Amino acid sequence: MSTTSARSGGASPRTADASGSATPATRGLLRRAERAGLLDVAHRVLAAQRLSTEDGLRLYEADLFVVGELANHVRERLHGDLAFFNVNQHVNYTNVCNKLCRFCAFQRLPNQPGAYVLSPEEAAEKITAQLAEPVTEVHMVAGIHPKLEYAYYLDLLRAVKRARPAIHIKAFTMVELDQIAKKAKKPLEQVLPELIEAGLGSVPGGGAEIFADRVHQESYSLKISGDEWLALARTVHRSGLKSNCTMLHGHIETRAERIDHLDRLRRLQDETGGFQTYIPLSFHPENTEMSDVPGPTALDELREIAVGRLMLDNIPHVKAYWILMDVPVAQTALSFGADDVDGTVVEEKIYHEAGATTPQQVQRDELIRWIRDAGRVPVERDTLYNVLWRGDEPAGGSHAPR
Ligand code: SF4
């Protein structure tokens, strides 16, 4: 494995020529931004200055294509033409959950039809079943099963590692970590080293929803609050683990609540530097208690990618998670601020219970083709963004085809 940083991969877009004058491309961008009422914002973006929360709110009002162009400028400044993916698989070890979030179609009560819990051995069998594939990561999240004991989580990690010792385990949302610490009857600071010892490699970013108290009370009141999510993430980062971060959009939240959410992520990132990737999650209403909410459109999804890229100036990556966007939307998002499309997945349950119609998995070659078709250079990464393969290197290069 190379330890080349993926972040060094791209060429910066040129905003000025040798004499210091704005390039024609920059002048065109500024003209379009002026027509959209975003000239001051565009100047700040070109100067790599932080946008305010007021700027963020204006990004929801302005012409989508100008907002997308500004976000694309930032994306290309950070990553050039590169677009990242990985070869991963998902394991959802239980769908039993007592949190009753109104936007969730995945949860089951213990005796409800379809409720399941995988034993550590059954989870390991799912890993073994993929040994012929070049999988580098397992993404493992689940419901909050009140009866699972602390030892179960340690056994789960150990069983997965035994099945495939080289695999990176990205597991447990902040909500699950809160539950695991309660079951361990110890503070998370003491639990994390034990989870790491058992095989935990990093933490996904789910369960953040929308941090605002109003949304917490109205749609996920039994689960940890926004403040608690952020405090847990701080502890995770202090333990040395990286995590991602998310925002569930397109349900009952206001634009101001979305910007507040992004601002709170940005402030924690200033403090810890522990977030690798921001992933806006589109609400899928089917089979949830909120099935009367229409959910976001493709254009809403593209705007959310762009707003995230522009506001989160200190988080390296923005992901267009193909499993919950239509594939063409994820491809388009690669020119609206996103630089990552997630991975091959294998057996996605959470969004397919809520009506997602994308495939449940994709082959590595197809993912590469999607990225090339979107005009970007595919780069296979591991969970921590070490480059494993680059689509722009000839055979025999340092990241040769695998
Ligand atoms: S979103 Fe997570 S915590 Fe909430 S009900 Fe669904 S599985 Fe449980």
Image (cartoon, rainbow, N blue to C red):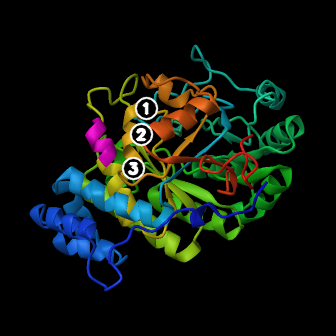
- Residue pictured at 17% horizontal, 64% vertical: 33
Towards the viewer: 72 or 59: 72
Q: In x, y percent, where is residue 123? A: 77, 29
Residue 23 left/right relative to 308: left
Disc 1: which residue: 327
- In this rendering, the label closer to the viewer, 3 or 1: 1
Place of residue 103 in the rendered image (x, y in percent of width and height, measured from the top left): 40, 35
Residue 372 seen anywhere in this rendered image of the structure: yes
The dot on residue 54 is: none
Q: Is residue 35 left or right of residue 283?
A: left
Residue under the image location 28 percent in, 69 percent down: 53
- The residue carrying pointer 2 sits among few (fewer than 14), some (14 to 19) or many (20 or more) residues within 10 Å by Cα, namely many
Which mark is first along the chain, 3 or 2?
Answer: 3
Question: In terms of depth relative to the viewer, which is nearer, 136 or 8?
Answer: 8
Report x, y in % for residue 279: 47, 50
Magenta segment main secondary structure: helix
Occupied quadrant, residue 140: top right
What percent of the width, then of the height, locates residue 333? 38, 45
- Which residue type carries mark 2? Gln
Local SS, label 2: helix
Vertical comparison of 98 with 41: above or below: above
Q: Is residue 111 above or below residue 399?
A: above
Please name the residue that numbered disc 2 is placed on: 331
